[in-house]
Image: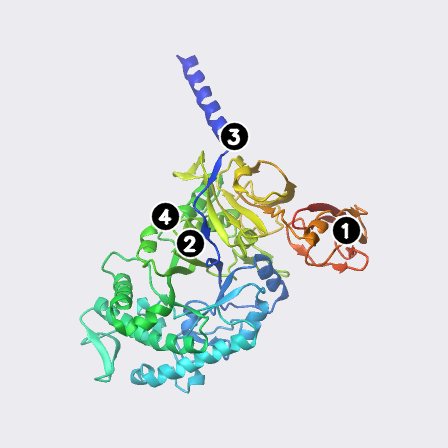
Amino acid sequence: MKSIIKYTFSIILIVFTFNLKAQITTTLSTNRNKTDLDIGFNRRSDKGIWWTDNTFIDRLAEMNPDILRYPGGTQANYWDWTTGKFLDSTNKTWNNKEVLHIPEFLNALPNRTKVIYVVNMARPTPATGISVNASEEILKSNATLNAKIQDMLNAIAEFEINGKLPYAIELGNEFFFGNEESGIFQITEESDGWHSGWDYANNQSFVSVNNKNATEINAKFYLDQCKDIVSTINSVYPSIKFALVASKKGNGNSVRDRWNNTIFDELTSNPKYTNLQSHIYAITQHHYLSTNYGDQTVIFDNTSAKVAIAEGIQYPIDKQEDYDIIPNNYKIWYTEYGISKNNAVETWATALRYGALIISWLNRGDKVGQLDYHYVSKNDVIKTGSPMKLAPIGIAAKLFALASGDMSEMQEIIFNNNPISVNGIKSLYGYKFKNNEKETLFIININNSDLQVETSNLFTYNGQYTKTQYYSNAPYISSVYLGHSNIISNISSVNTNSFTAKNFSITTIEVANSELSTEDNNIDKISVYPNPVTNIILIDTPIITSKNIVLIDISGKEVSVYVNKTNNSIDVSDLKAGIYFLKTKHKIIKIIKL
């Protein structure tokens, strides 16, 4: 009997091992438009120096986000763009945070990064000539609204003068709460009922029997304000898009539901808002993996790390109804999403969870148009110090931008025999991106086993594969960053039909379009000497420019070097000894610097 038990166990073990090592086959889902999808960050004011720190600016360039949200979320309801800080005489104290004016903010952004400007609808700035502590009658008057609109126009002009017009205007932040942070959209409970909005005929706020009814009035008051703001700004800046504030679902009859239902019903059925409705491009929602969601265990081994990472896939699945409530004629902009619970802080697991969240949000559907992680100066994104370094989420953001930036098409990758990682969540997730120049893959493996993945059927371009991969054998170790021994990276030039997705890995694979210009073809016929090199690399090719050839270090970061186009050489004398890669669209050459 004992021998039979042992024999059965060994058979099960052999089958299990075989399944993990078998090649994962792949197919592609329906082609989708990538041009109206932006992945980026919130900006917010923090203590210390950030936006004028050159190493922070360098890290931002490495992540190369599609979009940045300025000045942030709740902070926007208190923001004075002329001073680059909070308004005085409010319930929000500044506490010596970093002052940031529009020119300094724009100067720190990569060239391709767009801006979504969250306007301050909650409170008047000093430029309006109206005190934040004026009477309710004054603060909610049409005269004050007009003064605020002019201040918004002046802020937009400041963006334009400094070289970057906002891509979009977000019309305030989280007014559905009706709390003190909401300014003129605050709902107050008084002896006669709940006060909100403004009754211009009787020159007083409306009074409701409960908070939910007051929220409906508040939502209409918000739309009235938005109607005038959008009409005026659109007449001056017709290219700017607009996004309205909404919320995720409540229990069906909560203040969140009342706000959402009122907004959507009024836009659909009330002719007063016909013009406003025609100019609204997106509806916003905010989502966080908080202490109210999932497992709160601080990760301590690979199993607990898998659980934490898998929540990045599961959370958007659980929030499908929040996606579904948004009418199909609008995009959904998740202008705040993130992780507010502290069970995987500064671990490689949080990088994979970030990647999982992006992929799972995209899987909700085509309405998803923006994902802004909260926030870019968070310690999981950029590690403070001298110099600042990319933290795990920063690395993941860099890799996603490497795969998706400036692409026009995208398709979800279907992994057909995809093993379970934990709690019913599978191991492999990914997307393919494409434009006229290249095709790329972004793939995460959230399992603690290496997996062999088929790739040959995912590409239509013929060229050399460039694979960039980051992984960790112990993703639960905290306080890690780019360059830390816990995070292993490699960049390689391969030409195979498959690759190994290492355990707990993020991988990008790029294939250039071989139908290139003469210049592109010439630059990909290069050879270099001497190699190893001490001072000067000589490049044997007819054409060399700083645009068609770059030098990167072992972490994938572009290295600044002098390119001499006269004699086709690169001066590497100032670089530290080590391994570098000379990269063109089709070719990577390993360089050893002595």
Choose top left, top right, bottom left or bottom right for residue 176: bottom left
Q: Nearer the viewer, residue 479 or 580?
A: 580
Q: Which residue is mark 3?
A: 21
Above or below, 471 against 262 in this view is above
Q: Are marks 2 and 3 in contact (CB under 8 Å)?
A: no
Marks 1 and 3, how far apart in space?
43 Å
| Residue 354: x %, y % from top left | 48, 51
Marks 3 and 4, how far apart in space?
28 Å
Q: Amino acid at mark 2?
A: Lys
Residue at figure coordinates x 68%, y 46% from the top left? 587
Of the two numbered discs 1 and 3 on the same chain, state the one appearing first in sequence.
3
Q: Which residue is mark 4?
A: 317
Marks 2 and 1, how far apart in space?
53 Å
Residue at figure coordinates x 50%, y 64% from the top left? 68
The local secondary structure at tag 1 comes to loop
Q: Nearer the viewer, mark 4 or mark 2?
A: 4
Image-based side of 36 in relation to 577, left or right = left
| Residue 470: x %, y % from top left | 58, 45
Q: Residues within 10 Å of mark 4 (few under 14, many from 20)?
A: some
Q: Are marks 1 and 3 in contact (CB under 8 Å)?
A: no
Q: Nearer the viewer, mark 2 or mark 1?
A: 1
